[in-house]
Amino acid sequence: MTKVGDRIWVTSNFSFSIRSVLDYRCPVDIECVSSGDVNTYIRFHQLFHQTDTVICLWSSGKNPIELHGYSFKVLNISPLPRNNVTIPQEDFRIEMMVTKL
């Protein structure tokens, strides 16, 4: 489990950090016809090079992503949104799975 701003080291010279989260899911205290996705903005760091990307929670085209011989999959993001409540970025918790290909 990680949070916005944390830096996670995959290897000694390859890491990533969660930059921000945009949550478009239906609030738990409202009934919606359809629910949106959650965009997780990630920066990958590798020796003098950075790559920015977005991993979506439910979009199979954008989750998982593969980079530098690893698969990065967002499994869950909490807390769930509530109507008229703004969740501060530092309160989001992102559960990810990183797998060597």
Image: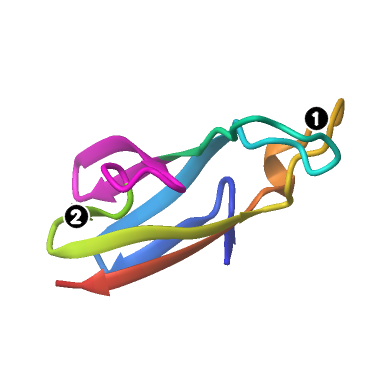
> Callout 2, which amino acid?
Glu
Tag count in the figure?
Answer: 2
- Locate the N terminus and report the quarter of the image it occupies: bottom right
Local crowd size for mark 1, using a 10 Å CA cut-off: few (<14), some (14–19), many (≥20) = few
**Pick the front one: 36 or 14:** 36
Residue 12: percent from left, percent from top? 27, 69
> Callout 1, which amino acid?
Thr
75 relative to 11 in the view: left or right: right
72 relative to 93 in the view: left or right: left
The magenta-colored residue range is: 42-62
Give above or below for 4 relative to 82. Answer: below
Local crowd size for mark 2, using a 10 Å CA cut-off: few (<14), some (14–19), many (≥20) = some
Residue found 59% across the figure and 32% down from its top: 34
Q: Which residue is mark 2?
A: 66
Residue 11: percent from left, percent from top? 26, 70
Q: How is the image coloured?
A: rainbow
Asked whether 8 falls inside the magenta stretch, the response is no
Compare marks 2 and 1 and give the one earlier in the sequence.
2
